[in-house]
Image: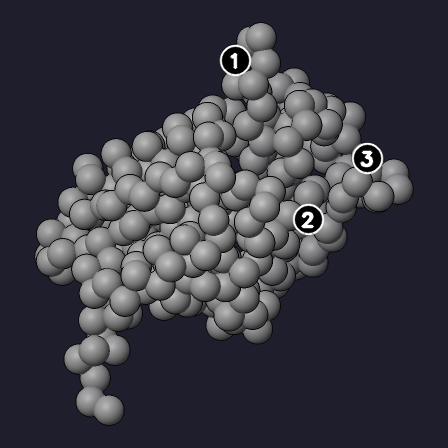
């Protein structure tokens, strides 16, 4: 399942939507000196600008005071030129991550991390969904992977990927099992999966013998090695799986594309609300 080509089509559609809609604004907030975070944010801004989205980049030092960070978010919440706000994770250790994510206006929370948006997702009334799980679902739909009645196994229970992916699969009428570091007989669980999503950040945690023949396998892992970027799944799984996302080029490009789509939706929702009579 090639994500790069699909992501390119989505970004073209986003650009067309922005051109037809008018101005759309995205603001990012990054605190700290994590190199990977700086690279990710730069890529997001490049993609946003290519799609015609006006992007504003706020980069704060690692020792930023929590009050300063919250004050910046308050300003962005009130800025009518900003439709979407993204707080890049992780935050420095002295910052209360939950408090900061809760301070983002849920109408501008294009990452889907605000408690209100997480709650709406759990109720099946999703407004903004985290970009990576949304990208996973879009890829599965693109390749016609049947989900209704299928057994979907998600390895990893993070708030960013694992849990929202499980909820989205459940909403698609799959029977969902969530595995994690305390799961007994992980291989027994994964071998029964018609759809397998792996997002733990451990190279090769899923080996060929742990995959059901013909399964649709989504590798969310991005791990740096001497051989370059590798996923969480043994490359040999390609000989056994019916579908497999490559690393790189699978889920990664979809994440940025879905963030851009969420930003356009935020702009449309906000303009509709302003235009509606009280």
Q: Which residue is mark 3?
A: 187
Residue reaching furthest to the bottom: 278
Point out the frontmost of discs 3 and 1: 1
Q: Are marks 2 and 3 in contact (CB under 8 Å)?
A: no
Residue drawn at x 87%, y 38% is 185
**Is residue 240 visible in the rendered structure shown here?**
no
Residue drawn at x 49%, y 39% is 63
Question: Which badge, 2 or 1, is on the more N-terminal residue?
Answer: 2
Task: Work out whether residue 139 or residue 110 is closer to the camera in this orientation and state it.
Answer: 110
Query: For mark 1, does the 10 Å Cα neighbourhood hold few (<14), some (14 to 19), or many (20 or more) residues?
Result: few
Image quadrant assignment for residue 240: top right
Point out the frontmost of discs 2 and 3: 2
On screen, residue 27 versus residue 153, left or right, reads left
The numbered mark at residue 277 is none
Q: Position of residue 16 (x, y in %)?
A: 15, 49
Question: Which badge, 3 or 1, is on the more N-terminal residue?
Answer: 3
Q: Position of residue 98 (x, y in %)?
A: 57, 58
Q: Which residue is mark 2?
A: 157
Image quadrant assignment for residue 237: top right
Q: Position of residue 74 (x, y in %)?
A: 35, 63
Task: Work out whether residue 89 or residue 58 is closer to the camera in this orientation and state it.
Answer: 58
On screen, residue 180 versus residue 216, left or right, reads right
Mark 2 and mark 3: Cα distance apart in space: 17 Å
On screen, residue 247 versus residue 4, left or right, reads right
Question: Which badge, 2 or 3, is on the more N-terminal residue?
Answer: 2
Q: Position of residue 49 (x, y in %)?
A: 20, 40
Query: Does residue 163 lie above or below 217 as drawn?
Result: below
């Amino acid at each position: 399942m090639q994500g790069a080509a699909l992501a390119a089509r989505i970004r073209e559609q986003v650009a067309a939507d922005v051109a037809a809609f008018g101005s759309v604004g995205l603001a990012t907030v990054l605190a700290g000196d994590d190199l990977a975070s700086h690279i990710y944010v730069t890529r997001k801004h490049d993609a946003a600008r290519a799609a015609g989205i006006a992007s504003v980049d706020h980069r704060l030092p690692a020792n930023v005071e929590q009050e300063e960070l919250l004050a910046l978010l308050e300003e962005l919440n009130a800025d009518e030129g900003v439709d979407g706000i993204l707080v890049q994770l992780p935050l420095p250790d002295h910052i209360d991550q939950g408090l900061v994510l809760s301070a983002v206006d849920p109408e501008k929370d294009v990452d889907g991390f605000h408690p209100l948006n997480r709650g709406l997702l759990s109720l099946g009334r999703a407004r903004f969904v985290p970009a990576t799980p949304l990208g996973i679902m879009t890829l599965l739909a693109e390749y016609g992977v049947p989900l209704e009645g299928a057994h979907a196994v998600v390895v990893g229970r993070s708030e960013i990927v694992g849990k929202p992916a499980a909820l989205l699969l459940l909403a698609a009428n799959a029977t969902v099992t969530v595995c994690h570091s305390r799961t007994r007989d992980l291989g027994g669980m994964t071998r029964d999966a018609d759809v397998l999503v792996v997002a733990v950040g451990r190279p090769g945690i899923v080996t060929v013998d742990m995959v059901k023949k013909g399964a649709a396998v989504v590798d969310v892992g991005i791990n740096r090695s001497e051989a370059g970027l590798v996923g969480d799944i043994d490359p040999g799984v390609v000989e056994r799986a019916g579908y497999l996302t490559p690393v790189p080029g699978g889920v990664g490009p979809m994440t940025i594309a879905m963030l851009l789509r969420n930003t356009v939706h935020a702009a449309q929702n906000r303009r509709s609300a302003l235009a509606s009579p009280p």
